[in-house]
Image (cartoon, rainbow, N blue to C red):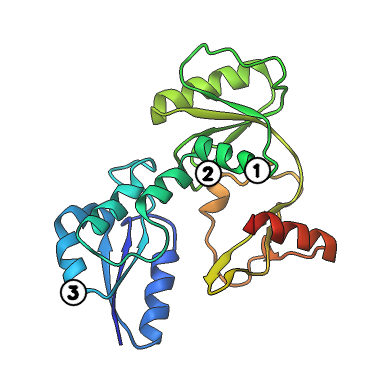
Amino acid sequence: MMRVAVVHTAGSPCECARAAASGLQALGHEVLVADSEDIPRLAGDIADTCDLVIDHTDTYQGSGLLRPVVRLLLEGRGARVVGSGAAACFRADDKAATKACLGAAGIPVPPGVTVTCRGQELPRWLRPPWVVKPAWEHMSRGLRVAGTSEEIRDGLADLLDRFRQPVLVETFIPGREFAVSLLEEEGGPRVLPPLEWCRAPGEDAVLTEAFQRTDGADGRTDAFRAELPPDRLSELEQLSVH
């Protein structure tokens, strides 16, 4: 039996921490659930008394930009944190940096630019409709689609003021939405069956924050195992491990 700390943002709608704690307890492990905001005070005790730490921080001090700080504090005190290190998490949470890494690795990414101030002109080749999103947030916070010059102007101004961070503007590419999870194993990552998010006709063209906050109760019909031809499934798996 191990003692495992599950760190999460208290009050977050994400149920990952609860699910992880329940699963660990069902396997006979002792679980300590801690609020991310308390980690500056608890990091040393957690490192000394817990065999592992699972970090499910959503925001830290109200910001998605700062959530890898929780992992950094735990690592600094010697805690064994499951998953990637704080430096990798900072990079992964930075959409602009991640996009540059993916493009450099040969993975297709939509055309786009990073906007850092009001009034910044978009290049002529970046045609509407656009997807607009804060560079450091997740859970689709602030994500929107803009189809006119007025919508992109007002959307950029709102996000720059509200989140005080760069905003990524990309060409909107319609299509199906998949989520692919990987497990790190000896010999390389293992790709789990892809999940498809399905939106009903008339719903938003992207997975908005409201959609992601929808209660994930049993019986939901908007998420299911993706059905793809073998060649498309193979292509998706290769891109995921690239």
Could you tell me the amino acid type at mark 1?
Answer: Val
Observer-side mark, 3 or 2, equals 3
Residue in view at x 42 percent, y 50 percent: 88
Q: Earlier in the sequence, mark 2 or mark 1?
A: 2
Q: Are marks 1 and 3 in contact (CB under 8 Å)?
A: no
Q: Position of residue 1 (x, y in %)?
A: 30, 88
Residue tagged 2: 140
Front-most of 156 and 89?
A: 89
Front-most of 214 and 182?
A: 182
Could you tell me the amino acid type at mark 3?
Answer: Thr
* Above or below: residue 149 compared with residue 242: above
Spatial separation of the CA atoms under disc 3 and disc 2: 35 Å
Note whether residue 179 is visible: no
Label 1 neighbourhood size at 10 Å, few (<14), some (14-19), many (20+)? many
Image quarter (top left, top right, bottom left or bottom right) of the C terminus: bottom right
Image mark for residue 60: none
Residue in view at x 41 percent, y 23 percent: 161
Image mark for residue 206: 1
Image mark for residue 49: 3
Residue 162 occupies quadrant: top left
Front-most of 21 and 220?
A: 21
Note whether residue 201 is visible: yes
Could you tell me the amino acid type at mark 2?
Answer: Ser
Residue 82 occupies quadrant: bottom left
Q: What SS does tag 2 mark? A: loop
Q: Position of residue 129 (x, y in %)?
A: 71, 27
Spatial separation of the CA atoms under disc 1 and disc 3: 43 Å
In the rendered view, does 167 fall on the left or right side of 21? right
Observer-side mark, 1 or 3, equals 3
* Above or below: residue 226 compared with residue 171: below
Q: Are marks 2 and 1 in contact (CB under 8 Å)?
A: yes
